[in-house]
Amino acid sequence: MPTDPDYDPHAPIPGPPVAVIGCGNLLRGDDAAGPVVIRELWERGVGDHARLVDGGTAGMDVAFQMRGAERVILIDAATTGSEPGTLFRVPGEELSNLPAPTDIHSHAFRWDHALSFAKWLLKDQYPRDIEVWLIEAASTEHGAELSEPVRSTARKLADRLARELVELEPTE
C-alpha cells in the first residue's frame, strides 16, 4: 500500500477550534440535558468555528471528538442533591489532574472518565482549554420527560453559549 510522504498521524485534525459536546441519554428524563443544549445550539446556529456534538452516552466517542479542538465545552446532567436546574461550571484548571479511570466499563463511562481517557489517548493533541457545565437533574428515570427546571436552565445555558460562540466567530 503506497504511503503519502506528507502524512503525519500526529498532526492536528483540521476543523473548528471549538467542540461543544453534550452528554446524556435522551430516554432518561433530565439525563438528556447535554443533548438538549446541543439541539438548542443547532437550531440557533453558532457559526463554522464551532463543532456541535451530541455525545449521547458514548463516553469513549466523546474523547475522540475532542481531537483537533483547541477548546472543549462539555455539558452533562449532575446528581449532587442540589436544587434541580442548578447550573455548575467546572473550569479547566480544576480538571487538569483527573485520575485515570480504573475498573470501568462502557455503561459507567462519565464525562470525567472521557477527559482522563482523552488525555491519555490524545497526548499532545489534548485540548488546552476545557470547561464543563453540569445541570442538576430532578429525575433520570427511564421514560421521564425533561423537568421544567432543567429545561429552563438548558435554554439559559444555550443562550449563554450561543452568545459566547458568536462572539468568537472571526470577523474578516
Image: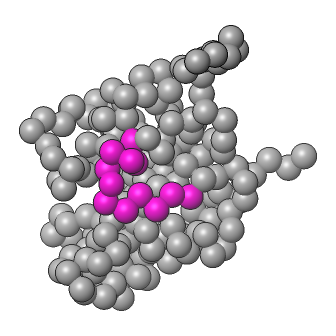
User: Does the magenta segment cover residue 61?
Assistant: yes
Q: Is residue 53 above or below residue 102?
A: below
On the question of residue 87 being in view, the answer is: no
Q: Is residue 135 above or below residue 84?
A: above
Instruction: Name the residue at 62% across, 65% down.
Output: 162
Q: Is residue 161 visible?
A: yes
Residue found at the far left of this picture: 103
Tell me: 31 left or right of 35.
left
Q: Residue furthest top?
A: 5
Residue at 39% across / 47% down in the picture? Answer: 61
At x 67%, y 16%, the residue is 4
Magenta-drawn stretch contains 60: yes
Identify the magenta region. 52-63
Q: What is the quadrant of residue 11 in the picture?
A: top right
Image quadrant holding the N terminus, namely top right
Say which of 38 and 164 sits in front: 38
Front one among 108 and 78: 108
Q: 158 left or right of 22?
A: right
Residue 7, position as x, y percentages in the image? 64, 18
How many discs appear?
0
Residue most extreme to the front: 1
33 or 59: nearer the viewer = 59
* Residue 20 position within the rendered picture, expressed as x and y whole percent measured from the top left: 52, 54
Residue under the point 39% across and 42% down: 63
Percent across and percent down for residue 95 are: 33, 38
Residue 122 pos. (x, y %): 43, 28
Q: Quadrant of residue 114?
A: top left
Question: What's the colour scheme?
Answer: one colour
Q: Could you say which quadrant of the image residue 102 lies in?
A: top left
